[in-house]
Image (spheres, rainbow, N blue to C red):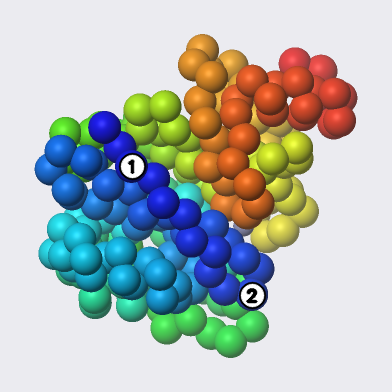
Amino acid sequence: MLVVKSFKVGPLETNCYLIVDKKTQRAAIIDPGGISVELDKKIHSLGEKNVDYILMTHGHFDHIKKATRYKKLTGAKLMIGVNEAEFTKNRRLNLCRIPIEPFEADVLLNNGNIISLGETKIKVINTPGHTVGGVCFIAEDFLFSGDTIMRGTIGRYDLETGNLNQMRESIKKILDLSKNYIIYPGHGEPTTLQEEKICILKILKYSF
Ligand SMILES: [Zn+2]
């Protein structure tokens, strides 16, 4: 069983998540775009060395800015989509006004990769469109959607490497999943796949 806790970080109130495999207490951080005192406390009570991975849905600064800080704190491996590798090194791509110290991910993720977190399996799906190498993470009943799908809307596709056609395909890929996942987005409140199916189709009039 996977336990999910969310923390708002940074000026854009990015959702940073701590996910914990309940049985083994192995943990991962998703999108550490800023520091959260509450997150730090949770990590400390869990044990810093229990954090195995730092997963990044994509490389915008508000999702990666404190990745190296949390790596130093925990020793966790940094993971990002293979097509997003440049974002951690390139200010033009990660959109940070104050340069982030360039860094390399430890693991570059491919579509379909399965990451083992204790007894929980986390599946990687490529969802380009918001950025070229963005990914979503699926584990148990949860889908971590980054800036691809948010409650009642989709992410921007007009930023560097964004692409509307890819965005359409990625949204379709998510909405076509058979399970009614709880969606934990990069910003805003959680939602469900079923709600978004209705909402996104209605609001954006996508012709799927
Ligand atoms: Zn973004």
Quadrant of the rendering where the N terminus is positioned: top left
Q: Secondary structure at mark 1?
A: strand
Q: Residue 4 at x, y = what percent?
A: 39, 45
Residue 96 vs residue 161, the one in the foreground: 96
**CA–CA distance between discs 1 and 2?**
26 Å
Quadrant of the rendering where the C terminus is positioned: top right
Which numbered circle lies on residue 174?
Answer: none
Q: Is residue 125 visible?
A: no
Amino acid at dot 2? Pro
**Residue at x 33% of width, y 48% of height:** 19
What is the quadrant of residue 145 in the picture?
A: top right
Q: Is residue 97 left or right of residue 87?
A: right
Q: Residue 102 at x, y = what percent?
A: 41, 78
- Packing grade of label 1 (10 A; few <14, some 14-19, many >=20) is few
Q: Residue 69 at x, y = what percent?
A: 33, 77
Amino acid at dot 1? Val
Q: Secondary structure at mark 2?
A: loop
Tell which residue pokes out farthest to the bottom in this image. 98
Q: Is residue 136 above or below residue 27?
A: above
Look at the numbered disc 1 and say if its residue's Cβ is closer than 8 Å to ligand 1.
Answer: no
Q: Earlier in the sequence, mark 1 or mark 2?
A: 1
Which numbered circle lies on residue 11?
Answer: 2
- Determine whether label 1 and label 2 are within 8 Å by CB: no
Please tell me in which quarter of the rendered image ligand 1 is found: bottom right
- Packing grade of label 2 (10 A; few <14, some 14-19, many >=20) is few
Q: Residue 204 at x, y = what percent?
A: 85, 31
Q: Nearer the viewer, mark 1 or mark 2?
A: 1
**Residue at x 85% of width, y 24% of height:** 202
